[in-house]
Image (cartoon, coloured by chain):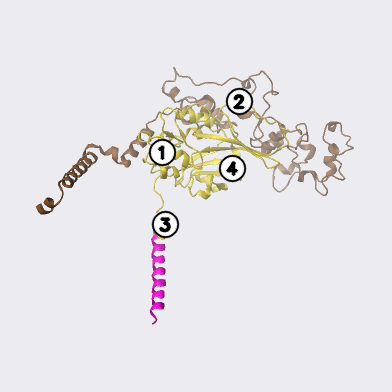
Chain colours: A yellow, B brown
Amino acid sequence: MNSRRKFLKDLFAFLLSGGAIGGILKILPAKALANEAPRKGKWYGFGVSVDKCIGCARCMEACKTENNVPREPFFFRTWVERYVIKRNGEVAVKTIETKPEAAPESAVDKSILRSFFVPKLCNQCANPPCVQVCPVGATFQTDDGVVLVNKETCIGCRYCIQACPYGMRYLHPQSHTADKCTFCYHRISQDLLPACVEVCPTQARIFGDLNSGASPLARFRRMNKIHVLKPGLNTEPKVYYASLDGEVR
Amino acid sequence: MKKILQKMPDALVRLLAVFLGLIVLGAFVVIVLIPRPRKDVKIQWADAVKKEQAKPVAYAGFHACAECHEKLYERKKTGYHRDLSCETCHGPAKAHTEDPDKVKPVIPQERSFCPLCHAYNPSRPRGFPQINPVAHNPLKACASCHNPHDPKPPTTPKECAACHGEIARTKAMSHHVQLACTVCHKAPQQHKVSPRSVKPTKPENREFCGKCHAKDAKDKMAKNAPKVDLSTHGEKYVCWQCHYPHSPEVEE
């Protein structure tokens, strides 16, 4: 055979096999991740029923009391956003105050198309970006799926605050370490409900174990149309929203 | 070996010795001197979890209240506030459960407290009981009329409100507050027995709403009602196909 043709043929075969091997090497770890065995034990999750929230801010108040969150209005582990969608398509979002004032609009404000409250808290992602970026391993996921911050080793570099796509973290002004919602980890390990769930007057917040077959959370996920925040980011949030509006980011 | 060392320049040998020393010293510091918990994140995480779990609890949970305050608990259990935790209004009470005599939870009595939930706000879900705090019995404490452990919603038509309480409460906030259900709906007696198969009537034509809202409406009640020209407004539709009569939209 003509040696140039043989050379080209061999080169083609070589490239093809190399590509195939490289592809397999790339796919294998992904396959291993996808085939991960179902988690044993507790795996905590949270439900938020947007239709039930009345924006009374009792959850925000209780969270600050329970977790010693600074009182200033810009430090929150959980908060409630008020969405006002106008007829002209304008969307106004504002975090409500801990002591809510009377609504600025009267009953006859015709420019409002629809309006509602959306409670927000740490999504305790199954695939948390904040854990990936921590340079000192100070933030981590517990065996029951809660993302915690180790105050002893946190160096306060704020990388995780930047990385969280939901803006759930803040730098604690006294300890100068990152701080965030822990699902009230000290309460749930004593079989108490998180403080915000405890005080919610309309059961807009539901807490439970995602692995349990019959629980308020299991029922919530079965009976509602469920959505999560920013599903496209592959963070796999464990805070599930029912009746979430498309405008909510 | 000796030959190689002799061949090497003196300076290089000394440099190598220094490096060797530094490596040994570094290994000693890392392996022996630094304690394990400083190196192993697994240990650090276990510690952090323990510390997190040891934090003090402020809210005792509703089961704790029922142990002593049985009567109030039983009373609340059947009322509209049944799903409310005691600590929603009375504040964190763990300290009170530990020392009931010294630490007393708050009893909110000011008029600004109940409106946190019950003041009118267009963002609140439709049907949630709301009032206008300025116009609603000014200067009277909420508890002087309503028992917070067993509140009663407005008692509009008793026959309907049992099932249609949400509509009753929505209507109570709207411009149609003065209209009884029976003005627009005729409910056959049988409706109460089999509510799904025997339904109450709805206004079937545009002239019905026109009694108040047509340009030439004569009804006394309708003096200030917004008026439209029935022949040009809304074409083929019955009014309630566009408007929600229990909470009608209002033109300024």
Q: Is residue B55 magenta?
A: no
Provide the chain ID for the residue under circle 2. B
Q: CA distance from mark 4 to mark 3?
A: 31 Å
Q: Residue at x 54, y 30 (%)?
A: A58
- Residue that carries the numbered disc 4 in the rendered image: A248
Q: Earlier in the sequence, mark 4 or mark 3?
A: 3
User: Which kind of residue does numbered mark 2 sit on?
Assistant: Cys
Q: Residues within 10 Å of mark 2 (few under 14, many from 20)?
A: some
- The one nearer the camera, B173 or B62, is B173
User: Which kind of residue does numbered mark 1 sit on?
Assistant: Leu
Residue B39 picture quarter = top left
- Residue that carries the numbered disc 1 in the rendered image: A148
State if disc 3 and disc 2 touch (CB < 8 Å).
no
> In this rendering, is residue A175 above or below B13?
above
Q: Position of residue A206 (x, y in %)?
A: 51, 39
Q: Which residues are magenta?
A: A1-25
Q: Main secondary structure of the magenta part?
A: helix
- The one nearer the camera, A98 or A73, is A73
Dot 4 lies on which element?
A: loop
Dot 2 lies on which element?
A: loop
Q: Nearer the viewer, mark 4 or mark 2?
A: 4
Both labels 4 and 3 in a single chain: yes
Q: Residues within 10 Å of mark 4 (few under 14, many from 20)?
A: few
State if disc 3 and disc 1 touch (CB < 8 Å).
no
Q: Position of residue A192 (x, y in %)?
A: 44, 34
User: Which kind of residue does numbered mark 4 sit on?
Assistant: Val
Mark on residue B50?
none
- Residue that carries the numbered disc 3 in the rendered image: A30
Q: CA distance from mark 2 to mark 3?
A: 54 Å
